[in-house]
Amino acid sequence: MAQQLRIELVTPETTLLDETVEALRFPLYDGQFGVLPGRAPVVGRLGAGELRVTTSAGERRYFIAGGFLQIKGPVVCLLTNEAIPAGQLKVDKAQQELANAQAKSTSTDAQYAQSLQEQERARKMLSMAKQK
């Protein structure tokens, strides 16, 4: 029998996904990460970008923005503050978020780092919104 892989995509408001999948691809804070059935256990920090879920019915995409990953056995659990189906992303909203992030004034290194992080998040959201 083939190994199964299950994703649990959880935000503070709800569990968006809890289903069997064939493969996953998503951003970690330092690069892309792919998962197939039989993957060794992992704990990691998520980055901002595209979550790609491959099932027998096809592929679905979500924008996620940070959080944590745990792979334990066949279960991949992604805990994130934000997960938006790609079809719900709006180019004008993403452009506005990028403009707002770029307009922020910073006076400390921490504020500057936060501003860069917000700009990167908005750029990735804008890129996904344009891909529809």
Image: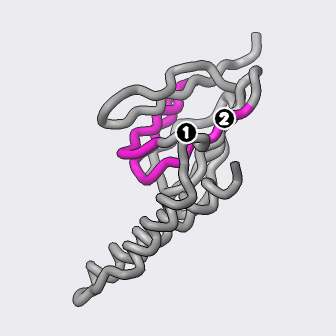
Which quadrant of the figure contains the N terminus? top right
The one of 7 and 94 positioned closer to us in this rendering = 94
Look at the numbered disc 1 and give the secondary structure of its residue.
strand
- Residue occupied by mark 2: 60
Q: Is residue 53 visible?
A: yes
Could you tell me residue 30's position as x and y percent?
54, 64
Residue 73 in view of the camera: no
Outermost bottom residue = 107
Question: Which residue is painted at 40% across and 45% down in the image?
Answer: 82
Task: Provide the secondary structure element on which disc 2 rests.
Answer: strand
Please provide the residue range marked out in magenta.
Answer: 59-83
Q: Position of residue 81 (x, y in %)?
A: 36, 45
In percent of the image, x 54 and y 42: which residue is there? 88
Q: How is the image coloured?
A: one colour
Q: Is residue 61 magenta?
A: yes
At label 2, counting other C-alpha atoms closer than 10 Å, the crowd grade (few under 14, some 14-19, many 20 or more) is some
Q: Which is more toward the observer, 104 or 45?
A: 104
The answer to whether the residues at label 2 and label 1 have Cβ atoms under 8 Å apart is: yes
Q: CA distance from mark 2 to mark 1?
A: 8 Å
Number of the label disc, if any, that sits on residue 32:
none
The type of residue carrying mark 1 is Pro
Question: Label 1, on which residue?
Answer: 85
Q: State yes or no: residue 81 in magenta.
A: yes
Q: Amino acid at mark 2?
A: Arg
Provide residue 41's location: percent of width, then percent of height. Answer: 53, 36
Q: Considering only order in the chain, which callout, 1 or 2, is on the residue closer to the N terminus?
A: 2
